[in-house]
Amino acid sequence: MANHDTPGPSRMPELAVEDEGFEYNLRPETLNEFIGQEKAKEQLRIHIEAAKRRGDALEHVLLVSPPGLGKTTLAKIIANEIKSDFKQAIGPIMEKLDLVSTLSNLTKGDVLFIDEIHRMKGYVQESLYPAMEDYQLDLAIGQGPASDVVQLSIAHFTLVGATTREGLLAGPFRDRFGIRIHLDYYEPADIQQSIRINSAKLNIEIEEEAEYALARRARGTMRIANKLLANVRDYAEVKGDGTLTLEVAEEALEFFGIDERGLDAQDYAYFRTIIEKFNGRAGLKALAVALSEDERTIAEVYEPYYIKEGLLTLTPGGRVATDAAYEYFDYPIGKQSSLFY
Ligand code: ADP
């Protein structure tokens, strides 16, 4: 990599893969179809089997991973495997009344999925505690001295919470999940397998070398692999006869500005900013302003992969671009700020 410029002409456009229909078709529906994450699957199989034998609802499950690794998919699989209904609530916008109506509409064994559970309001989280523990909801009736609290029984359900930031959950909340599962970034071989299966589902002809070329650039993330496949397929259809040979795949990846590590224009802008503007070290707020990007997106979507790749470290003094980042983006090493490093 011999320059500081973004690779290719532009950020990869968000194409059809964001479309719910496309994603839905590609979602594995059983634990056996869910690729990789062997430890997580084994853990779930054991708990599901034990709950079935006891005739109990499955314990509450907390799924933790960066975005796009399969938390929602796994939550739906859990409901399928225990033959229960899957219901979903949007955590961050939930108020206490929404929670009461959601919980009181559950039937025995239902799986209630709440994504981004760390973003639920604190007082709404707290009113979940008795529901998770004793299947009871405390409801305040009236106001002032005449007010009263009544307890409402709710069905034995399974809460499946998903979070990208386990550390932001209050301890007592986290402790109420009997099963906690971490999903790791996927190996290229797992992603290649998924690309092969999805190509077959979508009737895409693809060479094995092309599968691997895409898999290596998917940043260990299934959602990105699906998106790459959709984009590269479009390119192959318009520029060629639709067949994804290695040559066509590499040409398309270059066209979309994806480098050999799966980094794109946005990632290059991030490192150019932290290195050139901030001398290799910056706080999240400053970076967000400089990049005109949302702080949460930077911290939860982009940075976990940089950290995994050894390009970034988090220190008490801010985000620090590592020597490996200086080398990869072709800046002289040793020029970075040494404060706190
Ligand atoms: P998250 O909820 O963690 O953001 P999703 O469950 O929405 O991630 O996964 C994104 C997409 O990646 C899904 O539509 C699914 O097609 C695919 N996917 C995720 N995990 C797997 C897996 N283990 N095997 C196959 N496909 C997967």
Image (tube, rainbow, N blue to C red):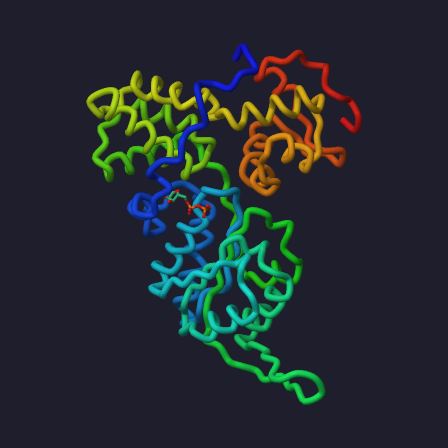
Specify the quadrant of the image occupied by residue 119: bottom right
Identify whether 155 is placed above or below 75.
below
Image coords of residue 173 (percent x, y): 62, 61
**Can residue 190 be seen here?**
no
Out of 276 and 161, give the one closest to the viewer. Answer: 276
Q: Which residue is drawn at 26% across and 24% down?
A: 236
Name the residue nearer the viewer: 98 or 259: 98
Query: Residue 288 location in percent, x, y?
Result: 63, 35
Instruction: Give the mark count.
Output: 0
Q: Residue at x 49, y 54 (%)?
A: 115
Q: Residue at x 47, y 48 (%)?
A: 40
Quadrant of res 120 = bottom right
Left of 225 or right of it: where is 281? right
Residue at far right of view:
339
Q: Which residue lies furthest to the bottom in this view?
A: 146
User: Can you tell me which quadrant of the image ligand 1 is in?
Assistant: top left
Locate residue 79, reporting x and y percent: 38, 60
- Please tell me whether residue 66 is drawn above or below residue 211 in the rendered image: below
Q: Is residue 58 above or below residue 207?
A: below
The quadrant of the image that shows the C terminus is top right
> Toward which corner of the image does residue 294 lie, by quadrant?
top right
Q: Nearer the viewer, residue 307 or 34?
A: 307
- In the image, 274 versus 67, the foreground residue is 274
Q: Which residue is drawn at 51% across and 19% down?
A: 6
Whole-percent x, y for residue 297 in the image: 56, 40
Is residue 42 at all visible to an observer of this figure? yes
Q: Is residue 85 above or below residue 296?
A: below
